């Protein structure tokens, strides 16, 4: 990694003292469902929802046979509940019918599941299977651009550039660090710049100072 990126990585690691997924799950089936539900929803809210969801439908077999209206009622508060309910039932059916009841490790198989895009597949690859992957959600996209780790206009471009910029064995950890930093410090609105150790290198902060001094 470049020295600048290495500095960011090490300072974030010091700040958060390690990383872990903030979603609650017991196995890869629960993980993939939880990540699908987390789109445009907080992990805290998803954990509340899945506690009830997995109590009622503990396995892929159970969820595959679920009534969509019942699932909609359980996950209603996570937003986009109709599409999400449909997708988690369909992906459960695929896991049973196409993959012998097991969440597939192969990336192309993962993204073939209903509701599973690149971000979800990358999270499941790293968190569920300990495979090198770097997922780009809104936090990763925002923070990596603000700190000028990359200069990307789309999540896919951001993912490709981060893969080149960050050592492969640190992809997943760097993703989690950027997520935590974006979630708690470098927020989309009203970022806590006064609490940030990167003001001296932050593109966003420098641009903000220019605007304030006009």
Image (cartoon, rainbow, N blue to C red):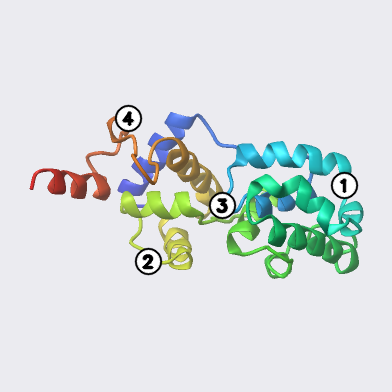
**Disc 3 + disc 1, Cβ < 8 Å:** no
Q: Inspect this view and state whether residue 124 appears.
A: no
- Name the residue located 59 percent from the left edge and 64 percent from the top edge: 118
Upstream in sequence: badge 3 or badge 1: 3
Report which residue position mark 3 lands on: 40
- Name the residue located 69 percent from the left edge and 38 percent from the top edge: 47
Report which residue position mark 1 lands on: 57
Left or right of residue 33, residue 164 in this image: left
Please identify, in this view, whether the residue under mark 4 or under mark 3 is nearer the observer: 3
**Disc 2 + disc 3, Cβ < 8 Å:** no
Upstream in sequence: badge 4 or badge 3: 3
Report which residue position mark 2 lands on: 153
Rendered position, 162 above or below 14: below
Q: Looking at this view, is 59 or 165 the one in front?
A: 59
Report which residue position mark 4 lands on: 195
Determine the secondary structure under disc 2.
loop
Please identify, in this view, whether the residue under mark 2 or under mark 1 is nearer the observer: 1
Instruction: Report the Cα–Cα distance between label 4 and label 3.
Output: 26 Å
């Amino acid at each position: 990694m470049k020295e600048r990126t290495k500095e960011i990585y090490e300072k974030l690691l010091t700040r958060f003292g390690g990383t872990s997924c903030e979603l609650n799950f017991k196995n890869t089936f629960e993980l993939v469902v939880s990540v699908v539900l987390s789109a445009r929803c907080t992990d805290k809210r998803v954990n509340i929802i899945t506690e009830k969801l997995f109590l009622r439908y503990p396995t892929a077999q159970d969820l595959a046979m679920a009534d969509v209206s019942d699932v909609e009622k359980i996950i209603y508060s996570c937003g986009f509940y109709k599409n999400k309910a449909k997708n988690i039932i369909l992906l459960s059916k695929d896991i049973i019918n196409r993959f012998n009841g097991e969440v597939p490790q192969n990336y192309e198989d993962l993204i073939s599941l209903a509701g599973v895009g690149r971000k979800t597949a990358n999270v499941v690859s790293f968190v569920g299977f300990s495979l090198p992957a770097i997922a780009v959600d809104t936090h990763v996209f925002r923070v990596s651009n603000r700190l000028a780790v990359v200069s990307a206009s789309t999540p896919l471009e951001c993912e490709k550039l981060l893969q080149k910029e960050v050592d492969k064995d640190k992809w997943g950890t760097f993703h989690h660090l950027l997520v935590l930093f974006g979630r708690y410090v470098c927020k989309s609105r009203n970022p806590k710049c006064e609490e940030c150790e990167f003001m001296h290198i932050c593109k966003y902060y420098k641009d903000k100072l220019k605007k304030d001094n006009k």
